[in-house]
Image: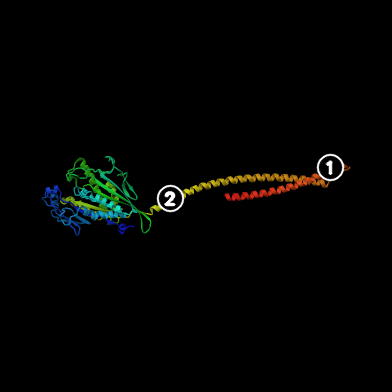
Amino acid sequence: MDSPTSKIGENVRVVVRVRPLNKREMERGAKCLIAMDNDTQATSILRPDARDSGNARAAKRASNDDSKTFTYDRSLWSVNPEDPHYAGQESLYDCLGKEFLDHLFAGYNTCIFAYGQTGSGKTFTMMGSNDDPGLVPRTCNDLFRRVDKLSDSHQCSVHISYFEIYNEKVRDLLAAMVSDNGGLKIRESPCDGPYVEDLAEFQVRTTASTAMNDQSSRSHAVFTIVLRQLFQDLNSKSRIEKISRFRLVDLAGSERANATGATGIRLKEGSNINKSLTTLGRVIASLAENDNRKKRDVVPYRDSTLTYILKDSLGGNSKTAMVACISPSDYDETLSTLRYADQAKRIRTRAVVNEKENNLSAKLLKDQLENVLSSHVSRGVELENLKKEKDEMRLMFEEWARNLDRENKALKIERDALRAHLRLAIESYKNPIPVICENKEADVEREKNAKAVNDLHDEWSDLLQDIGHFKRDIQEDIATFAIVATTAA
């Protein structure tokens, strides 16, 4: 069943995380400009120091400004492990990863994406290290721990995919061979939204050095877990199938081109990255503003590959969270990310449980229907054969009746002839021709005639008896024909 929040929608969860000062920042004497309140979950960015070479221009623009403060769902302080409210990888997973894995098992689509400038800690947040794993490995480990604890009647299958969006093209990171040209196509399903066609299951990741970060990712990486569950509902006794999806997205760096020191191919990559992130910003702005408008604007999902793939996660059937990773010392980029995150928290998504009930019963009914249809076809053939047999029998009986009729007519003609002959014989017997001279020969002739008349009379009696038998046989045959014809029909 859908939870109440799934019907009315809920806001995108936003978590802000600030990393420690890196070596480059400490060498230039940069100071941490971020302050977080663990009670109110407020994040403040302080006015930059004009003596900091990395923030000289920002310091002039912000000379009259005090700190700027934003409030989020969680503000995670990851600057100094010695601080009382320090939040490491485990804290992030406990406050976000566990909850979203709960949603995954409940049947909801979920998505967590990391946003921020290059070097702000996005990839560390998502992937981590061998000693300190991030959201993706912790989620996978917890997922299989939970699957192992399920009962035998609760069947589960887990499928993963991993792809990157590089220069607006989709490349499969788990494929044995990755082509540099073309890229995979994006299709859209009425039920599941946009998806990558022919996406398979290996590991490759495009990286290139910029002045911002020696291991800067130049692509957006999308790791997807699909969980299929099949179990019996204890209340309804029906079989339930749930298919839910968990997307973990590591976005490329959001820094300005003039800050990266990139040229040529790297500048083109940055341009494509900025295009997709700019489009993402427009999508977020449009979704945030549409909730307060009666007439809603068209959301530009299709303007970039990234936003098209994340269409369902950003404004559709998904529970979504954004981890805004920020630098402690870069005023302009950090302020931009904080504003971005502040806008994202106003987006509402409407997630529903992706489940199918009585799936096995439906299959059984389908099989039964196919059997009935097959039986119906078979019986139809049998009926056609019976109709043919009935027609053949009808023709046979009609021919039989015609033959009987002909024989009956012939017998009538023969009977009439015998009657006429008998009549003449009787008449001759009763009225003999007068004989003038009677003698012995005449007496003999008379006796012969008398004997012939008697023989004819006997023959006539036998004939009448035969005709009676024949007539009775014909009537019986006609009655039998009528019964057979009725049964065949």
Which three-letter amino acid code belongs to the residue tagged 1? Glu
Where 337 falls versus 267 (above or below)? below
Residue 347 position within the rendered picture, expressed as x and y whole percent measured from the top left: 26, 55
Q: For the residue carrying disc 2, how many other residues have a C-alpha within 10 Å: few (<14), some (14-19), or many (20+)?
A: few
User: Which sits earlier in the primary sequence, circle 2 or circle 1?
Assistant: 2
Residue 247 position within the rendered picture, expressed as x and y whole percent measured from the top left: 28, 50
Q: How many marks are shown on the rendered structure?
A: 2
Q: Secondary structure at mark 2?
A: helix
Q: Which mark is residue 122?
A: none
The answer to whether residue 298 shows anywhere in this view is no
Q: Which residue is mark 1?
A: 445
Q: Which mark is residue 367?
A: 2
Cα distance between the residues tagged 2 and 1: 96 Å
The answer to whether residue 276 shows anywhere in this view is yes
Where 177 falls versus 158 (above or below)? above
Question: Which residue is found at the position 86% from the left and 41% from the top?
Answer: 441
Question: Which residue is found at the position 65% from the left and 50% from the top?
Answer: 476
Which three-letter amino acid code belongs to the residue tagged 2? Asp
